[in-house]
Image (cartoon, helix red, strand yellow):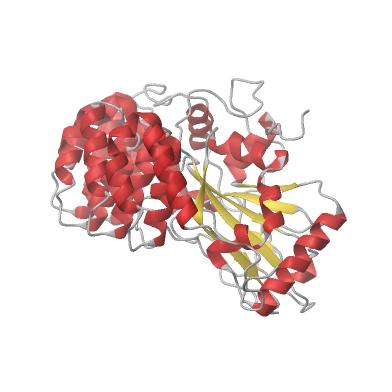
Amino acid sequence: MQENTPLLLTDEQMREFITNGCLILKTDFSSEFHSNLLAQLNTVYAEEGNPGNNLLPRIRELQKVFDHPVVTGALTSVLGQNYMMHAHRHGHFNASATAGGWHKDSYWGYDRMRNHHPNWAMIMYFPQDTPVELGPTGVMPGTQNYQTRTFESSEHEGEVLASGEAGTFALIHYDIWHRSTPNVLGEPRYMLKFEFMRTELPQAPSWNNQEAAWRKPANLLLPIAEHDLMWEETWNWLSGKIGSLAGTAASDPDQIKELSAKLDGFEPLAINAAYDLARRGQQGVDALLEGLNSENKQVSRISAYGLSVSGSEAVKGLLVALHHENIEIVTHAIFALGELRGLAAEAVPTFIKLLEHPADRVRCAVVDALGFMNTPLNEIVSSLGRCLQDENAQVRFMASLSLSRLGSQAEAAVPQLEIALDDENRYVRAHAAESLNYIGSERAKNTLIKFLLNSRWCPTTTKTNSFYP
């Protein structure tokens, strides 16, 4: 294997990631590498404080971590080739004996539907030996698909700790529940958190795939519930199949009624019911559409997950829901149609009209969904370009991400992206630059180079070392 050849995950590792939502992996850097990295971190934090989004330019050795074949292989396996590093990154410093609270990371103020499919992921990297006593990050496996915290106590026997030698890292589904654990030693503990996003939707497996069929992993770490249908559907989705559950079970009226009743209940069981309804033909879809139109937010949201994997039979009812007066229902319908991708291409004209909707949340959902569509391309690119000037920063940011997904097909948006490079919001600026990189035309590259030269960052310039040497 060449030094920079990604070390792709195996089938078994992908099965573990799909079910557990996390993998604990390790790079093979030398102890000297991590000693130097730690020394740089200690100096910067002591003299300047947390460098925040400037972690990479300020800690020069750190980029080698994200070029390591174990790291690139894990990210490629889960997010596909050409994944993007989010402009936000954070070096967590923990010397506290008090545990942090369980939480999911936000989408920077963007109240979006969280994906069951792995479109976003995080890496939490530990540059020092991190025994349990030093307070590694704790992850609750299998909870990436739950909006609510389905476990009661702060201490839970199912918790996975990212504990190990220097170079250990946790690869996690972005939406998983996690926390910091107590650092009873009181010594400095760093955890370097970086976020990544998929820019290409799956056409085929991007890991070292040897088996076509789904089966559960041997190392199943679930403290809450099993989700056989959802896991199988996710495996198939990662293999390039859309709506793989559709029509795979009988449309039994009694079973459909029983499953529908479970949509308003314990979230893990409600999710299972939604995926089960997704495979029961038009009658199952109709039950999910009824749930989608419920005033109960959980029922509506979980029904949308079922509809998002129900195939073409769900499209007609979802299009009707786009005109609902309830913003929650409209947003859930947009999400489901976006997940159906090309099967829901007829939604694009209505999506474009919804970009005039007064609710920020609706416009955010639309620009996100448009990034999964490519027909009619000219109208999509033009609309996303206009959204780069939306009054809401999250709309502008997500418009840029969607243009990145379209890559070279989005060249017509380059003039609007050039304007976005001067946006007041740091993430809009950063991801406008990313979009130009993914578009890759001569004008896009020239604009990007000028922007990067003008914003050049010197990693050795500090308040104590302004100019020399």
Percent position of residue 124, x then y: 64, 56
Percent position of residue 55, x then y: 60, 62
Q: Nearer the viewer, residue 447 or 51?
A: 447
The C terminus, quarter of image: bottom right
Q: Nearer the viewer, residue 10 or 377?
A: 377
Q: Nearer the viewer, residue 144 or 187?
A: 187
Percent position of residue 331, x then y: 26, 48
Among the 4 quarters of the image, the one containing residue 274: top left
User: Is 397 positioned to the left or the right of 19 in the image?
Assistant: left
The residue under the point 50% across, 60% down is 104
Residue 219 seen in this snapshot: no
Residue 267 seen in this snapshot: yes
Total marks shown come to 0
The N terminus, quarter of image: top right
Q: Residue furthest right?
A: 31
The residue under the point 56% across, 62% down is 54
Q: Relative to residue 169, is residue 440 depicted above or below?
A: above
